[in-house]
Image (cartoon, rainbow, N blue to C red):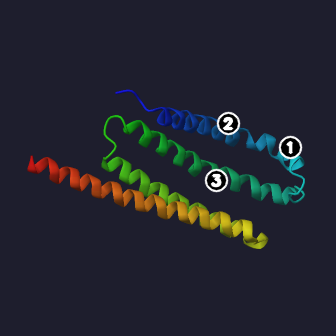
Amino acid sequence: MKEPVVSRILKYALYAAFVVGLVGAVTLPFTIDTLFRVFRNAPILLAEYRAFVLPFLMAIAVPCLWVVMEMIFMLNSIPKEPFVIRNVKALYRIGVIFFVLSLAFFGWNFMFLNIVILAGAFFMIGSGLFAFTLAALIKQAIVFREENELTI
């Protein structure tokens, strides 16, 4: 069966996001000063601020790359068998990662609290809830499929 065009585009976009994210995470220690000069509205990059921002961004990059990898694995399972426990567990992990990221994002930006920070944190919470809902839906589809296979 030929892979749908949307799946191919999504797969290429996920691969590109992973590569760009990985290159960005690896080069961040060398490019952070340039980024702060480009985005002039950001606070002045003091040594203390840089010592806090850089490890935070590096720590955030790892779970974000993990989420992209999980999505790539799930997308690659669609042509073979999408309704497997591995995808359910991956969605639960993605949901947990989004909740942890929202807490980290909200906690780190608490002193700069504004509507954009709140919107970002609530978006991540909503994404985590969506991942949990989708995991429960796929888990129920697995149960229905297994019951259907037993009756045939």
Q: Quadrant of residue 144?
A: bottom left
* Front one among 76 and 7: 7
Q: Amino acid at mark 2?
A: Val
**Which label's residue is closer to the chain start, 3 or 1?**
1
Residue 102 point in image, percent of width and height: 60, 64
In this rendering, does residue 109 appear at all?
no
Residue at x 37% of width, y 48% of height = 87
Q: CA distance from mark 3 to mark 2?
A: 15 Å
Mark 2 highlights which residue?
A: 23
Q: Quadrant of the N terminus?
A: top left
Residue 98 point in image, percent of width and height: 54, 59
Mark 1 highlights which residue?
A: 34
* Front one among 56 and 99: 99
* Callout 3 secondary element: helix
- Is 112 drawn above or below residue 142 in the view shown? below
Q: Amino acid at mark 3?
A: Ala
Which circle marks residue 59 in the picture? 3
Disc 1 residue crowd, few under 14, some 14–19, many 20+, Cα 10 Å: few
